Image (tube, helix red, strand yellow):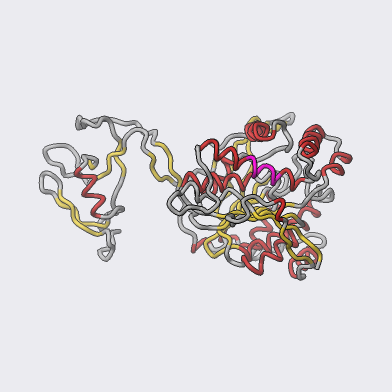
Amino acid sequence: MKGLNFSWPQKSEAENLAKTPAKSILVPDVSSSLRISSTENLYIEGDNLEVLKILQQSYSQKIKMIYIDPPYNTGNDFIYNDDFGHHTSWLNMIYPRLILAKKLLCDDGAIFISIDEGEIINLRMICNEIFGEENFVNNFMWLHGKGKKDSWSRTLQQYVVVYAKNKAKMKPWNEKKVCDYPFKNPDNDPKGPWFSGSLSFTETRSNPKSKNFYTIKSLSGVEWSRQWMIPQSQMEQLIKDGDISFGKAPDFDSVPRKKIRPGAKIDVIPNNIIDDCNTTRGAERYLESLFGCICFSYPKPYELIKKLASFMNLRDSIVLDFFSGSATTAEAVMRFNIEENCSNKFIMVQLPENLDEVLGKSVTSGKSVVKNAIEYLSKKNLPHNLCEIGKERIRLAAKKIIEEYGIKVDESKDEHNRIACVDLGFKCYKLQSK
């Protein structure tokens, strides 16, 4: 942060952690992988600080979107390290990881960080220092359900803090929303009621050199020469289809506007309050439908991460989550690819926390959740660690996606079948000391 020195005990030691070279390498785990011959997705087991250092070799400035849900005081038993409960320890943990994360982002990339009110002030100050205050995008508030309460109030939101690598190089964001405008039919349009939307710049703001600078004429002969928001061919088709309003007859002398019909989706600037992406409880119920039990506490819904991804206009990009937990981000990317007909890849990173040890230390209401996870893994003859839950979630989600869309995934990734081309697998790697 310019003009302000944000400091805390052992900050210099934390910064030095980001500078020391990696002491490990990544080795493939073929037996844990899914559709290994065709996938470009990665699942990496290990300390994310080490993994972030290793990723610099191949992914420096290549990641378009990073989403993380780092540990904070939620009562979650799946914590990254028992010492991260206090502010100083939390700062020492997150600081070097964010330094390394920034180096992985491409120039028009951004990082999304889920956080609660306990650490948001510290997080903002750290991110201002690392990414620059000028690259702050917004602090989105996700309304996640009933929330938590004390004697004075109930907190309904969690935060998603967003910083760009270079905001000046990042395209403006928009999202598609179903129109809920008051539709009317002042011209007795046989297609029914409509609402008008702008299609042009004013004459003073128009660029005569733009490829979308052209002239159109109304039924009464009135002409407008200016820069439009759509190509001339598209404009002519809209006029032919009766989807352009020129104002009242017989003058038809109003600036042409598009007729937007009920149910149509339009591009709007995203609101910073997110209230249409499921809830924490809804995400738990969804995981229960996959696993047959609740085996992860406080998961984020895939709908939330999918929505955030839509802001970035991802097409053939890489999405990284280095606190991947139950691998919600992986499912969000797979679903986003199908719905948006694109080919993004994910990289999940998670510490293989020993769930038997977590269970032994747990004294919270989440103890039953840890027991459920252990029992599930035992039935599958899988090791009792959190990575196994994450990998299994991807396998189960992939199966569910295939069933939902009625598709057959072709290992050869048939280029003529876009659904078959959707990557529903992952290559697994584990950290190993050099």
On screen, residue 328 versus residue 263, left or right, reads right
Q: Residue at x 14, y 37 (%)?
A: 249
- The answer to whether any part of residue 410 appears in the image is yes
Q: Quadrant of the C terminus?
A: bottom right
Helix, strand or loop for the magenta stretch, by majority: helix
Please name whichever residue, 402 or 250, is drawn nearer the observer in this view of the structure.
402
Q: Quadrant of the N terminus?
A: bottom right
Percent x, y of residue 365: 80, 32
Q: Which residues are magenta?
A: 390-396
Percent x, y of residue 2: 63, 65
On screen, residue 228 versus residue 283, left or right, reads left
Q: Was residue 108 drawn as part of the magenta stretch in this picture?
A: no
Q: Was residue 395 drawn as part of the magenta stretch in this picture?
A: yes
Please name whichever residue, 345 or 85, is drawn nearer the observer in this view of the structure.
345
Q: Residue at x 54, y 65 (%)?
A: 107
Percent x, y of residue 398: 60, 43
The picture quadrant where one finds residue 306 is: top right
The picture quadrant where one finds residue 267 is: top left
Please name whichever residue, 375 or 67, is drawn nearer the observer in this view of the structure.
375
On screen, residue 19 versus residue 422, left or right, reads right
The picture quadrant where one finds residue 285 is: top right
Percent x, y of residue 49: 74, 60
Tell me if residue 22 comes above or below residue 182 in the rendering: below
Tell me if residue 285 comes above or below residue 333 in the rendering: above
Tell me if residue 428 comes above or below residue 76 in the rendering: below
Tell me if residue 274 comes above or below residue 31 in the rendering: above
- The answer to whether any part of residue 124 appears in the image is no
